[in-house]
């Protein structure tokens, strides 16, 4: 539904989630629905930024937990990009408000981290990694 909300004639949203399965995260206080809500909100904000600020024409969302490192969300756009300082996006601006800060806080609340990769005219990738909880398989 999120992709449908943002897709229109000028923007293509691609979802790759074939390898996503329910997972354990490194937090005893969060249940599965809280994890899903936070990941959804991070993806929603990244999509909003890609369309509103980056003027992206294509956005790819990838959700994967097939690797041993944890749950990985990636939102990559082909927009105008911007200059980052060591993977940190500017937390607030006249246009974007506190979107980046809020996404980072959501990731950290899940015991994870967020990384932003961008360059002018090269698009932007927002990557969120949430570590798996140690469990016996």
Image: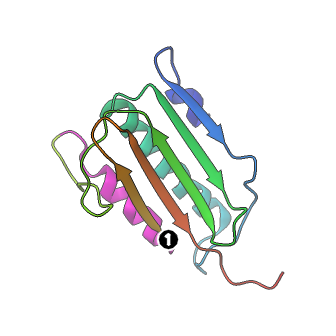
Q: Is residue 101 left or right of residue 67?
A: left
The stretch of residues the image draws in magenta is 95-111
Q: Alpha-carbon neighbours of circle 1 within 10 Å: few (<14), some, or many (≥20)?
A: many
Residue 130 at x, y percent in the picture: 56, 68
Which residue is outermost to the right? 137
Q: Quadrant of residue 73?
A: bottom right
* Quadrant holding the C terminus: bottom right
Colour scheme employed for the rendering of this structure: rainbow
Residue at figure coordinates x 74%, y 61% from the top left: 22
Residue 15 at x, y percent in the picture: 63, 38
Residue 121 at x, y percent in the picture: 31, 35
Which residue is outermost to the left? 94
Residue situated in front as seen by the camera: 19 or 3: 19
Which residue is outermost to the top? 9
Residue at figure coordinates x 66%, y 79% from the top left: 133
Task: Kindly state the secondary structure of the residue where label 1 is placed.
Answer: loop
State whether residue 129 is above or below residue 29: above
- Residue 102 falls within the magenta-colored stretch: yes
The prevailing secondary structure element of the residues shown in magenta is: helix
Q: Is residue 21 left or right of residue 57?
A: right
State whether residue 39 is above or below residue 1: below
- Residue 103 falls within the magenta-colored stretch: yes
Please name the residue that numbered disc 1 is placed on.
112
* Quadrant holding the N terminus: top right
Q: Quadrant of residue 131?
A: bottom right
Q: Is residue 20 left or right of residue 91?
A: right
Residue at figure coordinates x 32%, y 34% from the top left: 54
Residue 37 at x, y percent in the picture: 56, 54
């Amino acid at each position: 539904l999120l992709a449908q909300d943002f897709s229109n004639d000028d923007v293509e949203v691609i979802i790759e989630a074939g390898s996503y399965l329910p997972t354990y995260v490194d937090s005893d206080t969060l249940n599965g629905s809280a994890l899903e809500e936070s990941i959804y909100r991070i993806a929603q904000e990244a999509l909003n930024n890609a369309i509103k600020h980056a003027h992206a024409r294509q956005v790819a969302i990838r959700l994967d937990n097939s690797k041993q490192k944890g749950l990985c969300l990636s939102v990559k756009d082909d927009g105008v990009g911007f200059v980052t300082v060591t993977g940190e996006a500017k937390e607030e601006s006249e246009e974007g408000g506190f979107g980046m800060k809020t996404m980072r806080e959501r990731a950290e609340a899940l015991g994870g981290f967020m990384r932003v990769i961008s360059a002018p005219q090269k698009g932007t990738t927002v990557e969120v990694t949430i570590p798996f909880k140690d469990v016996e398989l």
